Amino acid sequence: MRKSMLKPTLITTALLLASNFSFACDKPNTEKKYNYVSCLHEGLARVELNDKWGFVNKSGKEVIPLKYDVAGYFIAKNPAIVKLNDKWGFIDKTGKIVIPLKYADAQEFSELADITGIKLNDKWGFINKTGQVVIPFKYDDVGFFSEGLAKVGLNGKEGFIDTTGQVVIPLKYDFAYSFREGEGHAKVQLNDKYGFIDKTGKEILPVKYDEIEKFKFNKSLYKITLNDKFGFITKKGKIVTLPKYDSFVLADQWPPRRFLRVKANGKYGFINRKTGKEIAPIYDKAEAFRVNYAWVTLNGERFKIDKRGRQISKRIKVTK
């Protein structure tokens, strides 16, 4: 298996940037056999051979020698991050070193800010694309800038600064996640509880939940958990359903599979995966939806309900 090229501090930024690209992958015409050849970005592709990294152009010609232990992408006209002999720096597309390889750790430049985090003598600060230090080396940990803010950590607590280095949200949380571009909130953790804050530091979802995570069946919703019960909120932190469910399963026999069957206190109901709207968990049994209806059982009677939870058939007495 090919070794992972990017260390953990770079992965988040790399994934964020990748989300802005087309899924099309234009690769160079390489006759030489490499262990790895990336897609072309700004006319160059990363290549690896014998654990060394360099760059080739579209025709496959090596334009930057394979001499680095790590090499990042050229993205949005930013210099590429490189590592050699445990030191990090940046190069331009000609291979010229534009920021010296003298740092203990570093993050890639992104499309979201003109500065990036970099580590020197066990402390993190921020530099611009010319290598000028714009925020001093004083933090134990930093994140990337998103929505104009970056998380920073010092003495076990985390908060947020702006691009001038001004502390905008005090360093009081045990852990803080970066702001999600376009959503306007960040997930924070304090005393093993989670919530959402906005860019002013105001709690838009109280820091009281046992977990908050993206809902895998609907990317516009988050799943919140409290005392082993779960519910759903919107991207803006608005409650869709309170934490009351014990479990869920997919509940459509055929595509587009819009419903989940949920269980709460021994009763069953449904949640529309697209809207988050609920058909209350009041039924003793609930079968999967068959296009436009589902069979449910309540108080010993079986009948059909539609997608809004309305009864649409006569009740049939269930016999044992």
Image (cartoon, rainbow, N blue to C red):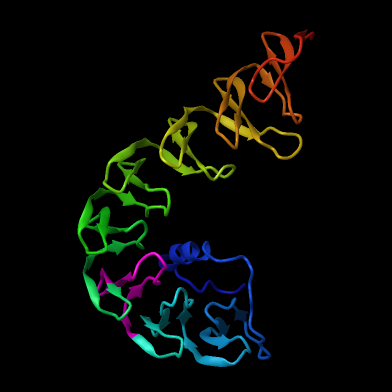
Query: In which quadrant will I find the C terminus?
Result: top right
Question: Residue 80, image x and y in percent?
Answer: 43, 79
Residue at 63 percent of width and 23 percent of height: 308
Which of these two is toward me, 219 or 251? 219
Q: Is residue 47 left or right of residue 130?
A: right
Residue at 41 percent of width and 40 percent of height: 236
Question: Residue 318, image x and y in percent?
Answer: 77, 9
Instruction: Find out whether residue 108 is within the magenta segment.
Output: yes
Figure quadrant of residue 218: top right
Give the residues drawn in magenta, as a range. Answer: 99-126
Q: Is residue 89 left or right of residue 68?
A: left
The correct choice, above or below, for 305 with respect to 227 in the image is above
Q: Is residue 64 left or right of residue 146?
A: right
Instruction: Find out whether residue 80 is within the magenta segment.
Output: no
Question: Residue 10, image x and y in percent?
Answer: 43, 68
Query: In which quadrant will I find the N terminus?
Result: bottom right
Question: Residue 246, image x and y in percent?
Answer: 54, 28
The correct choice, above or below, for 267 with respect to 74 in the image is above
Could you tell me what secondary structure mostly forms the magenta stretch? strand
Residue at 52 percent of width and 92 percent of height: 63
Which of these two is toward me, 67 or 181? 181
Count the marks.
Answer: 0
Residue at 67 percent of width and 86 percent of height: 29
Which of these two is toward me, 89 or 96? 96
